[in-house]
Amino acid sequence: MSLPMIGLEKEGYLRGHADGHADGHAKGHAEGHAEGQQQLVLRLLKRKFDPLSDALEAQVLALSPSLLLSLSEALLDFTTSADLQAWLHEHA
């Protein structure tokens, strides 16, 4: 049987719950954004260089969000998958 919480305990519990919820929401949002960025870049690369090798796909998935953003701009100038390989070699 648990005892009812008193003022400060209840306030601490509620604040901790709210902080945990906000942290979880922010983390989930960031992870979802990063995953969406990965999927968009992969989709563009696959459209340009179909098929994209598993090795190249794995390298793209390992990129940080800032490098994914750079790649999303750079891929507009790529003409062959060798351009992608060179970019990954230089930046990853």
Image: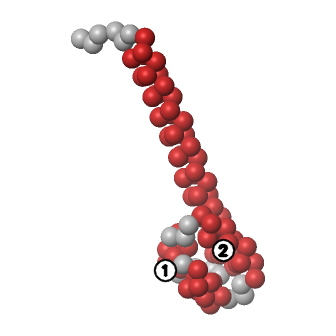
- Which quarter of the figure has residue 9? top left
Residue 59, percent from left and from top: 51, 76
Apparent side of residue 3 relative to residue 30 in the rendered image (left or right): left
- Which quarter of the figure has residue 60? bottom right
Q: Which residue ends up furthest to the right in the rendered image? A: 77
Q: Which mark is residue 71?
A: 2
Q: Residue at x 75, y 82 (%)?
A: 77
| Vertical side of 87 occupied by 32: above or below | above
Near-viewer residue (89 or 43):
89
Q: Is residue 43 visible?
A: no
Quadrant where the N terminus sits is top left
Residue 35, percent from left and from top: 57, 58
| Vertical side of 71 occupied by 13: above or below | above
Amino acid type for the residue under numbered disc 2: Leu
Q: Is residue 20 visible?
A: yes
Q: Characterize the local packing of mark 2: few (<14), some (14-19) or many (20 or more) Cα atoms within 10 angstroms.
A: some
Q: Which residue is mark 1?
A: 55
* Circle nearer the viewer, 2 or 1: 2
Near-viewer residue (27 or 13):
13
Q: Characterize the local packing of mark 1: few (<14), some (14-19) or many (20 or more) Cα atoms within 10 angstroms.
A: few
Label 2's element?
helix
| Vertical side of 21 occupied by 44: above or below | below
Residue 82, percent from left and from top: 62, 90
Amino acid type for the residue under numbered disc 1: Ala
Asked if the residue at tag 1 contacts the one at tag 2, i.e. Cβ–Cβ closer than 8 Å, the answer is: no
Q: Residue at x 50, y 40 (%)?
A: 24
Label 1's element?
helix
Name which of mark 2 and mark 1 comes first in the sequence.
1
